[in-house]
Amino acid sequence: ASPQLEDGLTAELMLADRNRTAVFKLTNKKWCPTGANDAAGADSRVCMRIAMLPHNTFPATNNFVNDRAHALIGRLDKPPPTPFHRLRLDRYDEFDLGGLEKRMKDGGLWFLS
């Protein structure tokens, strides 16, 4: 069985409005627990449900700057690694976290001083 959109949504409606929350119900037997209610069919079983969150509120990586007014989160690509000796753990913060902090500040996501 293929996934079913809930609340009367269709694929066409989802394509027309990417900023809408959609919930899918997976009705394949492996996603629905077995039990006494199996005779009634997948509609009555408690099956796994997956939500697709609104694109403007939960944007893809590097896209939060396009809709800052609605975005609840912002994600950036991880900066390229700086080569150094990984066994020198005392330098980890200086290289990796320092680069990540700079990347977040450049992208407007760093709010700490």
Image (cartoon, rainbow, N blue to C red):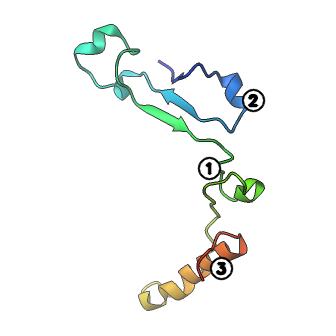
Q: CA distance from mark 2 to mark 1?
A: 17 Å
Residue on which the image places disc 1: 58
Q: Residues within 10 Å of mark 1 (few under 14, many from 20)?
A: some
Q: Position of residue 53 (x, y in %)?
A: 58, 41
Secondary element type, mark 2: helix
Q: Residues within 10 Å of mark 3 (few under 14, many from 20)?
A: some
**Res 41 → quadrant:** top left
- The numbered dot on residue 102 is 3
Residue on which the image places disc 2: 16
Three-letter amino acid code of the residue under disc 3: Lys
Q: Is residue 100 visible?
A: yes
* Sequence order check, earlier mark of 2 and 1: 2
Secondary element type, mark 3: helix
Q: Residue at x 75, y 29 (%)?
A: 16
* Sequence order check, earlier mark of 1 and 3: 1
Farthest residue toward the left? Answer: 36
* Sequence order check, earlier mark of 3 and 2: 2
Three-letter amino acid code of the residue under disc 1: Phe
CB atoms at circles 3 and 2 under 8 Å apart?
Answer: no
Q: Residues within 10 Å of mark 2 (few under 14, many from 20)?
A: few
Q: Position of residue 51 (x, y in %)?
A: 52, 36
**Residue 3 to residue 54: above or below:** above
Q: Residue at x 59, y 19 (%)?
A: 8
**Residue 77 to residue 12: above or below:** below
Q: Nearer the viewer, mark 1 or mark 3?
A: 1
**Res 108 → quadrant:** bottom right
CB atoms at circles 2 and 1 under 8 Å apart?
Answer: no
